[in-house]
Every structure is written in C-alpha cells, then in structure tokens.
Image (tube, grey):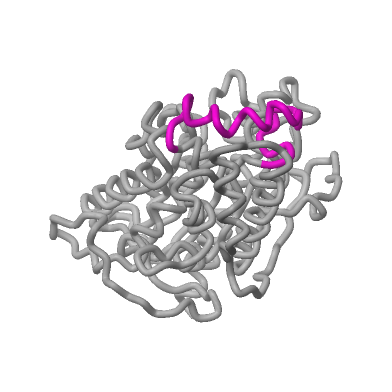
Amino acid sequence: MGHASSSDNSKIKQGPDHLLVLVHGIMASPSDWIYAEEQLKRRLGSNFLIYASSSNSYTKTFGGIDGAGRRLADEILDVVQQTDSLRKISFLAHSLGGLFARYAIAVLYNLENLRRGQHGYSTSHTNGNSDKLKSLSASGTIAGLEPINFITLATPHLGVRGKKQLPFLLGVPILEKLAPPLAPIFIGQTGRQLFLTDGKPSKPPLLLRMTSDSEDKKFISALAAFQCRILYANVSYDHMVGWRTSSIRRETELIKPSRRSLGGYKHVVNVEDCPPVSSEGPHFPSEAAKGKEAAQTEPNTENTAEYYHLMEEEMIQGLQRIGWKKVDVSFHSAPWPLFAHNNIHVKREWLHNAGAGVIAHVADSIKQQESATLIAANL
C-alpha cells in the first residue's frame, strides 16, 4: 500500500498477511490472470500474497461447481498452511470461478482453527458450528483467516437459463429450448447446475441451495462474513454471461447505464451500493419441483418458463439478504466490444487490454478496504 505503521512493518518483514485468491472461469487456467496479477502486485504491495488458483484448470471445470469448489478449498488450505504470516483473505473470481469460490468459502467457513505447523486438515473438517446468521452481519473466518473482500467479474450467480442470460443464444426461443439438454453433453454436470436441472426433481438445484445456509454448508453466512462484496457486470456485449445474472438483478431493475466512464476507470460506468434486503430466504415449493421435472424431461418454453422465473426470484431474495456493491462495465466504445467477457479481466493483454480500467478499479477498491480495515483495527 506504499506505507505502513511500525507494527505493520514487522508483519511485512515476516511475510505477507493478506491472501488474495484469483479464480479463473470455465475452460481456463491461471495464465488468464497474468496481466491482472502483475497489476495487483504492483498496486497492492508486498503485504499481499496474490495466488492464482490452478486446481480447476480446463476440463476440470466441467465436473460440477461442488467438486470444483471442494478442490479450490483444499488448494487454499495448502497455501494457508504453508504461509505462517497470513491473517486475512480475499477472493477475485472471473465468470464460473465466482461460483467455485462461493462454494469453496462455504466449505472453509468457520473451519477448525488452522494452527501453524499442524497438518492433516481437509475440507471434511468443520467445527459443527450451527449458530444462526445473526442479522447477516459479518462474522466467522474463512480457512482460519479474516475474510475481507469477495469480488466477482461477470459471474452467472443466477445461472444461465432465462431470457438472454446466455447472450450468445440471442434470446431465440428454439435455441434457449435446446441449450439445457445439450449443455451436459458439452460441459457435464456443470451444465446441469448452470441450467438448474441438476439432481432429483424433488430437490432444489445447487445454485438455489447456495443462496442459503444448510446444516452442512453455510453458504450465505460465509458470504456475509466478508467485509466487502463487489459484483462487476458487463451491461452488454458479453456473449457468455448476461447483465442480470452477473449483477443479481431482476429484469425490471436493469436501467440503461451511462455511456460515460467514471473518472480514471475507463469502461466502468456505474457503481451502486445495495444494502441488505430483508427476506425469509429462498424456498423450493411443490410447483417448483414439478417445473424442474418438466425442465429435465420435456423442456419447452411453456412448461419451464414459470420454473426458471420462480428459481431466479428465490435466488435473488436469498442473495440480497446481504449487501453488495454493484459495478457496471460497458465496453461499447472499446475496439473489440464483443470480447467483453474476457476484456473484463484482461485475459490476454495484447487482445483484451480494454479492461485495464476495470482491473485498476478492482485494485483501488481492495486498497480502500485494506485502509478501512487497518483504521478499524487501530481504533
């Protein structure tokens, strides 16, 4: 951060105290983060250990969000156990990686105290804490560390089923009808989960379960434990993930954004602080089970539209019980706007460098939160 108190200097000499985990998306690898990692290291300084996850590279992203999330959790535990100086943890995830990260933090939430020098921990070790989420306030730890930032870039938090949620289908009914049954052929269990057709008809799909707490996974409590949660969403030109699902908004909440960039951050066009919205949380009523069965066996627009609309609303209500900062990004003036999905994290600097302003905004947001954390700690 460029400066630190004398007590902070002693920590830096011992090693970084803040772990920032970078999580890539589908059919990708740690190399997607080369530019972002370099910029984050330069802007954040030596107090951060910036780690690009490698446990779910390429086709490993096809085996399901839950499996990938567990692998990511194990990988993070290894890093934490090997770095004694770590005290805090943050996540920056792109696309599908945001869902992997959401699953992983639920696995790691309130994990048994991670003592330096002890080994043998695995993701099956949890402390059995069944405390209720008290007003969804920040509490608990992730892998034994203090959770600070949870940031996603173009992540399909609500799945990809529904009007223009998977934009390259162009909203064409026949294409949107064919996509759910074909997705598992190409991207396996992950495809079923993204289209909300995974599991038995009587059971809620994984993405709905990930918007609440259960006995074995505290999905919403884990998210609530972070001091800052930020959603970066492409408002247009993203052929993979729609604006609605990446910003956790209803169709009626999508307002035409400004075409002017915010000062100093090219293509970042809007920042909105969204406070928590009180709700009983998500439900999976009997009509949803019938709709899910229809979506699995006889998918068509008529008998599945209500199911997907109901699931989207339930997921939104679950996720809006905690506050979010929503950052809208528009590459309408970029040389290659159709590369928006990869521009947003600068996958390849020579081709996707239009997203440099987004990475700068991410870095400054992390710095701002780090400063706030230090000030609070010294009060």
Magenta residues: mostly which secondary structure? helix
| Residue 7 showing in the rendered view | no
Please give the name of the residue rendered at 13% of the width and 55% of the height, measured from the top-left corner: 120
Q: Is 182 within the magenta?
A: yes
**In which image quadrant can residue 274 be found?**
bottom right
- Which one is in front, 204 or 218? 204
Q: Residue at x 26, y 71 (%)?
A: 127
Specify whether 355 is left or right of 103: right
Depth check, front residue: 59 or 39:
59
Which is more toward the observer, 87 or 14?
87
Residue drawn where x is 46% and y is 37% of the image: 190
* Quarter assignment of residue 276: bottom right
Q: How many marks?
A: 0
What span is colored magenta in the figure? 162-189
Q: Position of residue 12 (x, y in %)?
A: 33, 56
Q: Does the magenta portion include 251? A: no
Where is residue 44 drawn, in percent x and y?
49, 48
Q: Is residue 370 visible?
A: yes
Percent of width and height locating residue 173 = 75, 31
- Residue found 52% across the figure and 37% down from its top: 39
Where residue 176 appears, as percent x and y from the top left, is: 68, 32
Q: Is residue 168 above or below residue 109?
A: above
